[in-house]
Image: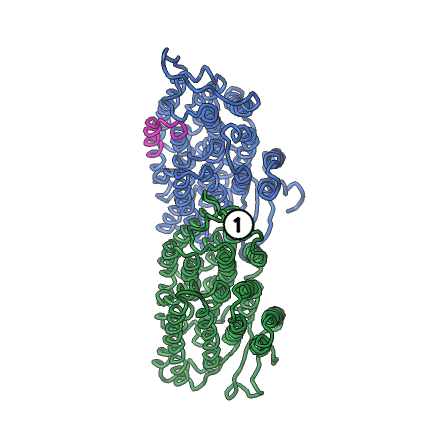
Chain colours: A blue, B green
Amino acid sequence: MQNLGDAYGMLAVTAPFAAAVAIAFGPPRWAEVFTYLAAGATLWCSAHLLPAVATGAMPSAKILTLVPGLDLSFRVDALGLTFGLLASALWVVTSVYSSGYVRADRLQHRRRYFGCFAASIGSALGVAYAGNLLTFLLFYELLTLATYPLVLHKESPAAVAAARKYLLYALSGGLALTVATIWTWQVAGTLDFAPGGFLQGKVSGAGLTALFALFAFGCGVKAAVMPLHSWLPSAMVAPSPVSALLHAVAVVKAGVFGFIRVLTFVFGPQSLAESAGPALLLTACIVTIVLGSFVAVRQDNLKRRLAYSTIVHLSYIVMGVALLTPNGLVGSVLHLVNHGLAKITLFFCAGAIYATTHIENVSELRGLAYRMPWTFAAFALASFGLMGVPCMAGFVSKYFLCQGTIEAGEWLSLGVLLSASVFSAAYLVPVLTIGCTKDEPGAAEHPAPHGGGGLRAALTLPLVGTALLVAIFGMFPAAMNAQYDLARQVAARVFGGAS
Amino acid sequence: MNSPVPVLLFVVPFLGALVCACLGWAYRPMARIVTLTTLLAGALLSGWSLAQVLDHGAVRCAMGGWRPPLGIEWVLDPVSGLAVFLVCGVLLFTVPNLCIELRKSASSREVSALACVLLLLSGLIGMLVSADLFNVFVHLEVASLSAYALVAAGGRGAPRAALRYLIMGSVGASLYLLGVGFVYAATGTLNMAEAAARMPSVPAPQLVLAGSAFIAIGLAVKMGLFPLHGWMPGAYAKSPAGAASVMAPLVTKVSAVVMLRILFWVFGAAYLRDQRMILELLGWGGALAMVFGSAMAFAQDDFRRLLAYSSVAQMGVVALGLAVANTSGLTGALLHIANDAVMKAALFVAAGALALHYGITRVDDLSRLRGRAPVLNAAIAIAGLSLVGIPPLCGFFGKWWTLSGALEAGRHAWAALLILGSLVSAAYVFRILEKLYFAKEELRSVPENGPRVAAWSCGALALTIVVLGLFSERVVSWAIVPALPAGL
């Protein structure tokens, strides 16, 4: 580490872990205070890095050597910072929401909840800022470990089953990634991420395909690409803030982020040009988008419906990378953020509805929009964002994804992408229409939303805030400039370095 | 360099055992004091001698001034220095718990049990530092006999387990002795260095083959390599809890080090690669052990039995590392020997304390512990996660090196089995963690004071697991690279 400026990335990773330790050993009442402090510190550190990284700098820090020649090292580049900023900014919002949610839903074991939450975010930031594959792997595994208690939080039989399934999937993925890492280390002699990849000419033929398959399995589990997706809907037994930040943003995006990292910073477009891997991955994504959408329409449980929608949108992002074109990559990186904003809003809404009325199913939402107008307004905005309605954040990323498919000449992918907007409408709009349908006279009354004004505010303000961001990012391109610049920088580095 | 240090390392616990028995017979608490003092002295001496060996090279001692062809030689080189330090260091954390258990049960066996522990220690050190094939057998028997006695001191089912251990152990030792006979017939010497030097020019290669095979199988029994592990679950589940925590982390590991020493220093990597059979058997045994041991561990009800099967699995990693016979593989084997000794010490000490203090012996009963004994819980969690191979805990790096070795050697089937075994091991570890942290039952009557000594030793061992992991590169380059055999 050359100077203090380089240490901010490391600080951003350390702060959440420090908070987790403080929460574990500190007094229970302080758990939320520590969370707020760490969330603020993390966001501040990440934001502090933005101006430097936007101009092309890559602050880096090496901590200690783990294996001769391999360090635990951090390096913040445009791609990592995009994910890091997303996770740390949304952590601040989610902390406010969590404070409201744990009271409204009367959650037990709050220290465990807040501690594991902080550790999960720390791991996600570690994944984002990792400078080499070993560091990436380390935090990828820690992420599994830190989110496991959160899935299991309610300790009900369903939660136990879901947690076991989650572990089985995530640990298998981690082991595949371990093997892939060791293999890469042996053929390349380095694991430091390089724009455009470092595996050109080092491995080819069947070896390349096998290595690609191992990486794809490792990242595909967390990115919930079919057929590795089934843990995600089950994991929805977790408390809503967990589903919102971790299972819609941090964990699954770590998988997607892994795909981007591995495909463009380990393999590189050149070495993948002759491999069948990306084409197969593309096929898997198309299947996931189509099948996932159909399944989503059939889900009555709101959170499960959103989970399948997450699965679909994650495959958009993976598809963008698998196209291996500059615009596709830009679209991926943008959609990483835009989907994050929209999806966290939707999950916040689902959680707010559940915490105040204990309604979980779409079919029971009848008339609820009149009781919770802010929530449903936010839901509407976020839904439009996901569908890719112009003037919403999702439109821009979809536009670039479509350009990517045209560049690559993948017409089938283009068709799927365009029709997927209709699918999104098919499973999101009914929630709104049912919510806005007036009660028939004589129908069973909803239980009145409970909780005081402060509680309602803690649940409502975050979701309104993120929904507004979806709209602002879509309507005022200037607001998106920083994000767009980072994405362009990634694409320029990766494809500029190759050609 | 000529120095009495190797012999001294052996003599300290050996004399300690005699003094312990005599003084303890006169006044019982003296046994404890003598034992702990001896252990502390042994640990300090072994630490100092390891530093010396790493700085100035191997230390030799010819007993009674007789030079090797005639006399018996003792050598402390980086491998044995490392292993001796490991043995003494781990015992420092486990034996105090045995003392507490013995004092609590107020049995008359206290003195003899402690004397046996010191005798076991002297045997283990003797196995590591003697440079003479027959002398290794003598110390192997000293260590084994003390171990049989310790197992037999347990409660219900212990005599049966001890008998089984005794029969299998004696068969293993006899096979080893038979192998030594063949090597002697082939080379005309029992000194390891001499035998290694004469090995290439041996007129009858069948004798060497028979010798190497018998030695390898005999030691495989002692290290509990699948499918020769039958004695292990009973011996470690039925013995007194404290005795299990003394034996389980070390006895099999020391046999593995002796296996490494004889295979790679006496027979040599080139011979083993040429001849292939031994390495093939070792590798397949290790790879299958990883899967089988982990699966059996998952199926167990008894906590200590589960841990014993987990040892079978971890010894599989070690055997696999030996079998690939390259630098990465052997680094992995040595590193994992150290790692598993620490992990198993933490787990067995915790298991013993839970049984003694809370009466918890079954895995399902762990849920009754909820919230109590946080240090023990955390130690079990850390050691368990390290067993699975979660970075940055030390178990990850043992597996990392071993896997690297297997992939380098092109043994993809072994690598795949190792990975599968890791996944299965996650099943039993998370079964324990689920019970410890996420079950709804509560223990009704709770003892006022938690097990303090166990908490301290488990805490220290858990910390060691983390430190060994984070600084694994230092450990490898400082202690393990010098310990690797030549000719890889």
Residue at horizontal 52 percent and vertical 84 percent from the top = B72
Percent of width and height locating residue A486: 54, 33
Percent of width and height locating residue A11: 62, 41
Above or below — where is A152 with respect to B163? above
Quadrant for residue B222, please give it.
Answer: bottom left
Residue A477 visible here: no
Q: What residue span does the magenta drawing correspond to?
A: A287-304
Mark 1 sits on what residue? B446
**Subunit that carries the residue with mark 1:** B
Quadrant for residue B268, please give it.
Answer: bottom left
Q: Is residue B335 magenta?
A: no
Task: Return the residue found at the far top.
Answer: A441
Above or below — where is A220 with respect to A380? below
Is B141 situated left or right of A452 in this image?
left
Q: Is residue A289 magenta?
A: yes
Is A396 situated left or right of A2 in this image?
left
Count neighbours of disc 1 (C-alpha within 10 A) and say few if under 14, some if 14 to 19, many if 20 or more: few
Task: Return the residue found at the far right.
Answer: A3
As rendered, which of B230 and A172 lies closer to the eye? B230
As rendered, which of B129 and A311 lies closer to the eye? B129
Helix, strand or loop at disc 1? loop
Above or below — where is B191 with respect to B439? below
